[in-house]
Image (cartoon, rainbow, N blue to C red):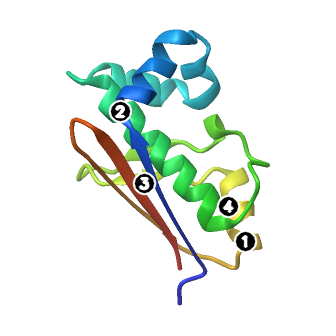
Amino acid sequence: MIKGIGIDICDINRFETAVKKNRKFLARVFSPGEIAYCRMKKNSVLHFAGRFAVKEAFIKSVSIDKTIALNEIEVANDRNGKPEIVLTPRIKAVLKLKKGKKLSVSISHTHNSAAAVCVIT
């Protein structure tokens, strides 16, 4: 049974502008692991934007008004490359409030936008 669902889309040009204008933006939004992962990629902005979209989709899926910091929501890849949200104690507590047991995410992007969906079951 679906307990929550969220979706987000991010404009790549707008996101790139935010990254370039504010040096503290990445540290405020992303974990050190996410920053390292994205910086290894040829077009890091696409990967940062995709992960940002996952974070926003997660917040929408749990219906909380940003009471959790974006950099507390860490997106990693499993051994097969599938994106997932790291289940830290804080994330587990939020899931428990929603009576959810499983969290599924998906990311997609083009040169112009990144989108993500998050489903809690």
Q: Secondary structure at mark 4?
A: helix
Is 24 on the left or on the right of 38, as rendered? right
Q: Earlier in the sequence, mark 3 or mark 1?
A: 3
Q: Amino acid at mark 1?
A: Lys
Q: CA distance from mark 1 to mark 2?
A: 33 Å
Residue of label 3: 84
Question: Circles 1 and 2: CB distance less than 8 Å?
Answer: no
State if disc 1 and disc 4 touch (CB < 8 Å). yes
Q: Position of residue 6 (x, y in %)?
A: 53, 65
Instruction: Judge depth for marks 2 and 3 and give the one in front.
Output: 2
| Amino acid type shown at disc 2 | Ile
Residue underneath mark 1: 96
* Kind of residue at disc 4: Lys
SS at mark 2?
helix
Residues packed near mark 4 inside 10 Å, few (<14), some (14 to 19) or many (20 plus): some
As helix, strand or loop, the secondary structure at mark 1 comes to: helix
